[in-house]
Image: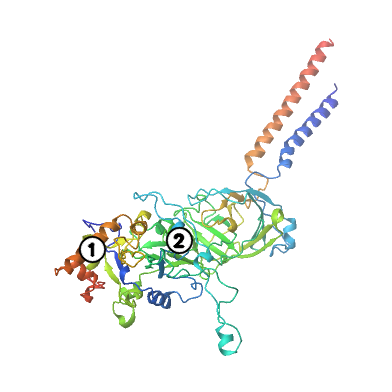
Amino acid sequence: MAHENFEIADGVDHQVAMVMDLNKCIGCQTCTVACKSIWTEREGTEYMYWNNVETRPGKGYPRRWEEKGGGWASEEHTERTPGEIPSSEDYGEAWEFDHEGILKEGEDKKLAPEGGKPEWGPNWDEDQGAGEHPNSYYFYLPRICNHCTHPSCVEACPRQAVYKREEDGVVLVDQDRCRGYRYCVEGCPYKKIYYNAVSKNSEKCVFCYPRIEGEGPDDEVQPPACADQCVTQLRLAGYLDDTEGPIYKLVEQYEVALPLHPEYQTTPNVYYIPPFAPPQHSEDGETVDVDRIPRSYLEQLFGERVNDALDTIEQERQKVERGGYSELMEILQDRNPAEQYRLEVFSDD
Amino acid sequence: MTDRSTWTFVALAGLLVVVAGALPMLADARPAYEIPAPTVEEDLAGTDAAGWEEVPAAEVPLESAPSGLPNAETVSTRSVDVQAARSDGEVYLRMQWQDAEASESASAPQDFADAVAVQIPADPGEQPAIAMGSQSNLVNVWYWSDDTGTEELLAGGQGSTTAFDNASVQTWAEHAGSGENGTWTVVFNRPAEPAGDNRTVITGDEDLDIAFAVWDGGNAERSGHKAVSGWYYLPFAGDSGGPPFESILWAIAGLAIVAVVVVTIQGVRRARAGGGE
């Protein structure tokens, strides 16, 4: 299918996409729990969080994932960047608790992880952030698989077990073909594929494909569980090539929704509205005209386009403040909830 | 020189020729790329089964497979000792290689298990491509790792291995010692003529091409990142003395030497006879 203004992968009819507005994330981890309850409460998946929410600035999950390589060396997509497999310690082991002993057998000990004091775990550096009082700052970054247009995990697999689904571009691991070699784990620069040491296969976020196919609760099309359960409803789910939908408008028309680490060259299909924060304060509490979240830090995460994105949002906001109308602000405020999940627009194809 | 002494000399020369011809054969007891595969009466089912004592071993050199995978060129295992034997309708292979420490389980994201595999053509009549065969010329792979156990696989090119239902291969495996003396021993066993499509039928009437691979889990070796051999063969065609052309060449050389000796002696005799007149 030809798309004039943007790129979707060869051989893919439509491309699922998600936009997350970081200004609305309160770090409650309801998305994380929703995902875990549905997908990773099986043996071997204890340490996995297909959806995680990490505090930024911070080391992330797995720890220092941005330093572990993967992705493409250039936008030509001919040479991949070498990557490494995170360690168990970097993911954080799933802690065991002696609930049975303490609650039922009356053992006199604190409810704490068994096997010694842990030194790292998912969300270990929650809310630490950076900066000095009164100008400290942090924000939350929810992450799922980006279902990339140029997925380096797909290219890394020597068995073609990782593939991009033709109908909607969802990236999946064929559990029958996978032999647990973990080249995909090395190859994904976002470290969003996980090895299951019990099944001996690798696995990942499936964009809740049974739900978006109508195989979920009540046999109706449902958005991915992470989006559906979000307390602040910060996620939009739909298709990038749905040119009438809010995702297309935010990503392609207004260019305010940006992929994480575009320099990895995988062309993610999860996009973020970058975070705003109040300006810095002086020692005596006066507001000063300095960004609290340094632009340089946001550029590290979202590339230089983050500056235009933030400027555009600021301009549109001021337009509304002056009593004007802004389609962008309407979209960002979810004034039309029916538009939030446009997952059936191509169902007649 | 009398006729009798002449023939004695010729006989001695002939003997020398035979010995000279046999020496290289004795020094190199079998042709290159042959893995002896005798029929053995005693038990072969086990890494230390008694029958292995009477089976000669072939040292098979290994090198990295050119897979193009990350770090594929760095492999740990340099050679594997291979023994092959037949016993009562069964085929057995014992493979032993040095590995300082056993990597037995892939229980963490960064852990990989040691593994070993044997590759044979699905159709013994035609030698497939060494790298997992091709779509038109399939291979059978007998695979073992301490993590996933034994697998009987079919492949038609790289990345195409598929497990047979109801594996007919069984294994015994043991790691002993440590450091320089650390050694894996793995025995594969399969019926010579199992049922099922695409399973190699080892009739015992023709040689069987065979290749080997070893993965060092401690070096994160897996998939095409492995130490591999070229094609070897099990001499099931009945002539374990090597290809016939070698014997023919030695026979021709021997006859030529005998002829030269005879002609030389005749010449000397004639010269002496002429000189005495």
Q: Is residue B218 left or right of residue A302?
A: right
Where residue A28 appears, as percent x and y from the top left, is 39, 76
Mark 2 and mark 1 lie on one chain; the one further toward the N terminus is 2
Q: Is residue A166 left or right of residue A197?
A: left
Report the residue that reaches farthest toward the top: B277
Where residue A50 appears, as percent x and y from the top left, is 42, 69
Asked which colour scheme the image uses, the reply is rainbow
Q: Quadrant of the C terminus of chain A?
A: bottom left
Q: Quadrant of the N terminus of chain A?
A: bottom left
Q: CA distance from mark 2 to mark 1?
A: 31 Å
- Which residue carries the number 1 mark? A314
Q: Is residue A4 left or right of residue B38?
A: left
Label 2: few (<14), some (14–19) or many (≥20) C-alpha neighbours in 10 Å: some
Q: Nearer the viewer, residue A60 or B187?
A: A60
Name the mark on residue B32: none
Chain letter, disc 2 residue: A
Which of discs 2 and 1 lies nearer the camera? The answer is 1
Task: Answer with the quarter of the image where residue B150 lies.
Answer: bottom right
Q: Nearer the viewer, residue A137 or B257?
A: A137
- Which residue carries the number 2 mark? A65
**Residue contact between numbered discs 2 and 1, judged by CB atoms under 8 Å:** no
Q: Is residue A265 left or right of residue B233?
A: left
